[in-house]
Amino acid sequence: MKFISTILALSCLYIATVWGQATHIALPAANSKVRLGHKFVVQIVRPNSIEGSIEVGIAIGLLTCPTSQEATCPPPSAQLGNVLYTGSFTPAFHEMGRFYQNITVTAPAEEDFFPVGRAQLAVARLHLLGGGPSPILELNSVLVHMVN
């Protein structure tokens, strides 16, 4: 019984550590307007943590969503859409103890057959955590509105 409770406690600690490393998309904010064919900034925030992680890289994608407001976009684990960026993730320390990186990307143009309407901006981040280390794939997304 003690073995099971020890394993359970270690599992909870591991999950809490992973959540403590979780990033989020600060920009663009949910429901922001993004112009087709124009540059925009994606700001990815990583909380400060006592447990360091080794950053492997990120991918940023933009996926058009179904036109029906009730329909949901596919999850980023199934589809990233048009890949806007792949590369390193090196968040730097900024005001009020925040670590983030701004990445400027270009939205697909209308000529690229990307429609006006709802779209899902997704970030896939791969990092290594712990003494092993263990690979962690983290997915974040935010809905935006594509406009001309």
Image (cartoon, rainbow, N blue to C red):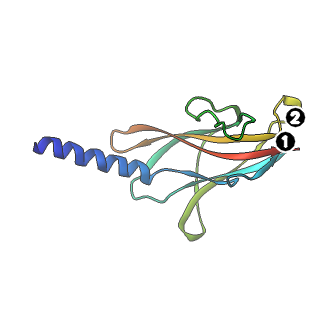
Q: CA distance from mark 1 to mark 2?
A: 6 Å
Assign a secondary structure to mark 1: loop
Q: Is the N terminus in the top left, top right, bottom left or bottom right quadrant?
A: top left
Residue 115 x, y percent position in the rendering: 82, 34
Number of other residues with Cα within 10 Å of mark 1, as a class: few under 14, some 14 to 19, many 20 or more: many
> Could you tell me which quadrant the C terminus lies in?
top right
Relative to residue 119, is residue 116 drawn left or right?
right
Residue 55 position, x and y percent, is: 51, 44
At horizontal 43% and vertical 50% (from top left) the residue drawn is 19
Residue at coordinates 60% horizontally, 69% vertically from top-left?
Answer: 95
Secondary-structure class at tag 2: helix
Q: Disc 1 vs disc 2: Cβ atoms closer than 8 Å?
A: yes
Residue denoted by label 1:
36
Circle 2 Cα neighbour tier, 10 Å, few/some/many (<14 / 14–19 / ≥20) = some
Give the number of marks: 2
- Residue at the bottom extreme, as displayed: 96
Question: What is the number of the mark on residue 73?
Answer: none
Q: Nearer the viewer, residue 17 or 69?
A: 69
Q: Tell me: 75 left or right of 69.
A: left
The structure residue drawn at horizontal position 66% and vertical position 36%, both measured from the top left corner, is 71
Snapshot quadrant of residue 112: top right
Residue 66 % position (x, y): 72, 33
Q: Amino acid at mark 1?
A: Leu
Which of the marked residues, 1 or 2, is nearer the chain's N terminus? 1
* Image coordinates for residue 37, horizontal then vertical, percent: 85, 40
Q: Which residue is mark 2?
A: 110
Residue type of the residue flagged with mark 2: Glu
Horizontal side of 93 relative to 66 (left or right) equals: left
